[in-house]
Image (spheres, grey):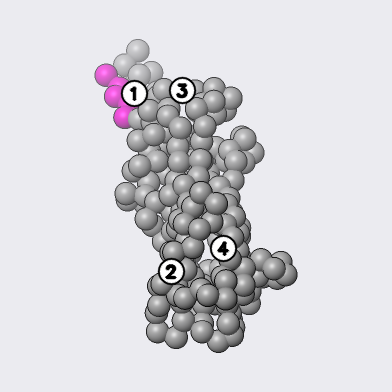
């Protein structure tokens, strides 16, 4: 009997904790948004620009104008905990979150043309829950996958472990040079696919 118990314990240790990946194949939607602002003839960098229910802030930086787009997006709904079987178990805790960033485009809203990163965008960053997940170099070679860490992960983990709806704060910042002149309508499109990796909590064998 003792030998059987020891073998079972060794087998469990060898296998290690089982992790489950919950992504688009399980019904997790992508985190995506689109915001457009109009730059009128009277626009001066430093002004705040209305964009529906949101506001885009601007500020003067050397050689150009910085545009900051803030948004809050839903990553998991309350109903997802019932509809996605792997999320039902109260013993499964969030281990990490991976983001596959598939799009971050700055677009001339009047023509639908994506602004060239080399000539029309001086710098660009994308952040999720305060963690920078992409810069201009990464945006030139999408898709890219990043793992949320620290505070960016903790806020999501607390919600998932408590089986509560999850929202994420998304911030895109771009600097457009003074020349060529920014388009009359500036639009941003972004999309990222989250994957929630869950696994068991602490397990004690007596």
The 10 Å Cα crowd at callout 2, few under 14, some 14 to 19, many 20 or more, is few
Element on which disc 4 rests: strand
Q: Nearer the viewer, mark 2 or mark 3?
A: 2
| Real-space Cα separation, disc 3 to disc 4, in angstroms | 43 Å
- The tag on residue 89 is 3
Q: Is residue 2 above or below residue 79?
A: above
Q: What residue is rendered at 34% in x and 23% in y?
A: 6
Q: What residue is rendered at 35% in x and 12% in y?
A: 1
Q: What residue is rendered at 58% in x and 50% in y?
A: 32
Q: Is residue 206 visible?
A: yes
Q: Which percent across, then down, holds residue 160?
A: 42, 33
Q: Earlier in the sequence, mark 2 or mark 1?
A: 1
Element on which disc 2 rests: loop
Element on which disc 3 rests: loop
Whether residue 205 appears in magenta in the rendering, the answer is: yes
- The tag on residue 37 is 4
Q: Earlier in the sequence, mark 3 or mark 4?
A: 4
Residue bearing mark 1: 6
Q: Nearer the viewer, mark 1 or mark 3?
A: 3
Residue bearing mark 2: 47
Q: Is residue 151 above or below residue 145?
A: above
Q: Which residues are magenta?
A: 202-206
Q: Nearer the viewer, mark 3 or mark 4?
A: 4
């Amino acid at each position: 009997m003792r030998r059987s118990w020891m073998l079972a314990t060794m087998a469990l240790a060898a296998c290690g904790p089982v992790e489950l990946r919950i992504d688009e194949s399980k019904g997790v939607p992508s985190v995506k948004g689109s915001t457009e602002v109009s730059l009128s003839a009277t626009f001066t960098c430093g002004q705040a620009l209305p964009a529906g229910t949101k506001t885009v802030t601007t500020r003067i930086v050397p050689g150009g104008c910085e545009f900051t787009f803030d948004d809050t997006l839903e990553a998991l709904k309350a109903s997802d905990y019932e509809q996605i079987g792997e999320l039902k178990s109260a013993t499964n805790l969030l281990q990490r979150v991976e983001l596959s960033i598939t799009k971050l485009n700055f677009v001339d809203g009047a023509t639908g043309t994506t602004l060239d990163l080399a000539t029309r965008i001086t710098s660009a960053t994308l952040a999720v829950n305060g963690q920078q997940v992409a810069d201009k170099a990464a945006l030139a070679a999408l898709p890219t996958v990043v793992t949320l860490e620290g505070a960016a992960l903790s806020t999501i983990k607390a919600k998932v472990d408590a089986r509560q709806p999850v929202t994420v704060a998304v911030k895109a910042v771009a600097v457009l040079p003074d020349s060529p002149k920014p388009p009359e309508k500036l639009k941003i499109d972004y999309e990222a696919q989250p994957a929630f990796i869950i696994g068991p909590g602490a397990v004690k064998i007596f």
